[in-house]
């Protein structure tokens, strides 16, 4: 049976304008078809990827971290009902493609549109004056900077009633990416040493993931003292404030804290392309270097004389398998082992998105959240 409302619903959304900016306008969101869920968003996390989405060549509903309530479900959707609190995840597994069948659901070929004919259209339409009636794409097939969104059922995970939605919304990217990169991809082991370059939303959760995995040396590196203080509170054993004296000073300091050889695992979480390869110089021979920020652009790699058996990994979404990983995160939160609420440094209304972007880019916030409803 279907609980889908036949009505089109209208509400505000932040829409990239195709010229590097955005507007707050109205969108009309269709009723859910078979296998779809329409969600009333309560809160959405803000990250650098959302700001980068302003470069999208056309209209785009922004946002890829979100939590809210099921508004209605389409035919065939099981385990979800109207009014239920839910988390959205942007790496949406189909369960049947080449990657999903190999337990690499974050790389789902349907979601990443290697087979676009199987995906369908956005089915969100502009209701305001600017693009009236035109179909509008949604960031990462979610578009969480909006009052309503329409998504595939596979993008939806029920949330424990105990979690506040304006905290839980960041589980769908920042927390999953950071914790998963340490636990699922690097597979940090008890007693390992870790360096984390960049302590924003993702980097702070790499710190938490390393702590959960039992690392005994966790070195947090950032330019902003407040970010380093938060990293220490979340489990960093050492903090290094980056300055203008270059990479060599960071490399020397990390080696001094790791018996002169480098750490077992080093993570880049700055989003700065020029720093993408720096983890290779922070890890020991035989160690893991991970670029977890998704930075794009030009970076340079210096190959020192002794540079042996190091692995360079660019994990997507912390290797997330939703059915496995989100219950595990919920459990760690319930046990008091994974911090969530205090990760959010700033909260904004949807119409203050410009302020959220500015605070993020200037380093004033470590993680901002839009309170939508």
Image (tube, helix red, strand yellow):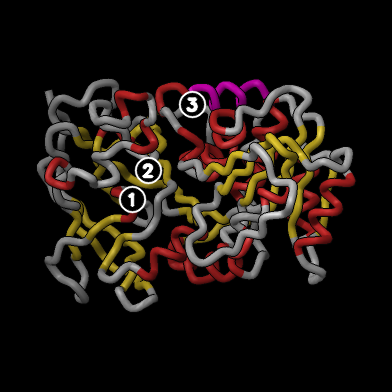
In terms of sequence position, does the residue under pointer 1 or pointer 3 come before the other? 1
Is residue 334 in the magenta section?
A: yes
Q: State left or right for residue 153 relative to residue 45.
A: left
Magenta residue span: 327-337
Mark count: 3
Report helix, strand or loop for mark 1.
helix
Residue furthest to the bottom: 19
Instruction: Name the residue rendered at 56%, 62% in the picture.
Output: 273
- In 3D space, how far apart are the residues under numbered discs 1 and 3 (Cα atoms)? 20 Å
User: Magenta stretch containing residue 168, yes or no?
Assistant: no
Q: Which is nearer the N-term, disc 3 or disc 2? A: 2
Tag 3–tag 2 contact (CB < 8 Å): no
The picture places residue 367, in percent across and down from the top left corner, at 60, 53
User: Does residue 276 appear in this view?
Assistant: yes
Q: Decide: marks 1, 3 in contact (CB < 8 A)?
A: no
Q: Give the x, y percent position of residue 266.
A: 68, 43
Residue 305 appears left or right of 249: left
Q: Position of residue 72 (x, y in %)?
A: 22, 36
In the image, 323 versus 146, the foreground residue is: 323
Residue 165: assigned label = none
Q: Quadrant of residue 302?
A: bottom right
Q: Residue at x 64, y 70 (%)?
A: 362
Magenta stretch: helix, strand or loop mostly = helix
Q: Secondary structure at mark 2?
A: loop
- Mark 3 secondary-structure assignment: helix
Q: Position of residue 333 (x, y in %)?
A: 61, 27
Q: Which residue bears the numbered disc 3?
A: 325
Considering only vertical position in the picture, is 201 above or below 154?
A: below
Q: What's the mark number on residue 140?
A: 1
Q: Residue 90 has which mark?
A: 2
Q: CA distance from mark 3 to mark 2?
A: 14 Å
Which quadrant of the rendered structure holds the N terminus?
Answer: top left
């Amino acid at each position: 049976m279907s609980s889908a409302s036949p009505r089109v619903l209208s509400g505000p959304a932040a829409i990239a304008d195709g010229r590097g900016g955005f507007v707050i306008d109205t969108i009309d969101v269709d009723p859910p078809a078979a296998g779809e869920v329409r969600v009333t968003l309560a809160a959405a996390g803000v990250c650098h990827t959302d700001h980068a989405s302003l470069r999208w060549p056309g209209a785009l509903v922004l946002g890829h971290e979100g939590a809210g309530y099921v508004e209605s479900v389409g035919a065939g959707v099981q385990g979800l009902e109207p009014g239920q609190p839910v988390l959205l995840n942007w790496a949406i597994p189909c369960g049947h493609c080449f990657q999903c069948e190999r337990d690499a659901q974050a790389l789902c070929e349907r979601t990443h549109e290697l087979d676009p004919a199987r995906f369908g259209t956005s089915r969100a339409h502009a209701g305001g004056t600017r693009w009236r009636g035109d179909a509008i794409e949604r960031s990462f097939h979610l578009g969480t900077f909006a009052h309503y969104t329409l998504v595939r059922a596979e993008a939806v995970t029920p949330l424990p009633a105990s979690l506040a939605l304006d905290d839980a919304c960041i589980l769908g990217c920042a927390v999953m990416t950071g914790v998963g990169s340490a636990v699922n991809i690097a597979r940090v082991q008890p007693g390992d040493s870790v360096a984390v370059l960049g302590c924003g939303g993702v980097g702070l959760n790499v710190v938490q993931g390393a702590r959960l995995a039992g690392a005994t040396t966790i070195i947090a590196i950032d330019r902003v003292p407040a970010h380093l203080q938060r990293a220490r509170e979340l489990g960093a054993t050492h903090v290094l404030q980056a300055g203008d004296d270059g990479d060599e000073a960071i490399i020397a300091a990390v080696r001094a804290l790791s018996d002169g050889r480098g750490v077992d695992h080093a993570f880049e979480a700055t989003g700065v392309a020029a720093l993408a390869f720096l983890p290779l110089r922070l890890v020991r021979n035989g160690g893991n270097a991970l670029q977890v920020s998704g930075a794009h652009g030009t970076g340079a790699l210096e190959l020192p004389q002794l540079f042996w058996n190091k692995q360079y990994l660019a994990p997507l979404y912390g290797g997330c398998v939703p059915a496995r990983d989100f219950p595990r995160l919920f459990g760690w939160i319930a046990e008091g082992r994974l911090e969530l609420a205090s990760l959010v440094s700033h909260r904004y209304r949807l119409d203050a998105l410009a302020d959220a972007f500015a605070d993020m880019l200037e380093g004033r916030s470590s993680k901002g959240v839009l309170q939508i409803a």
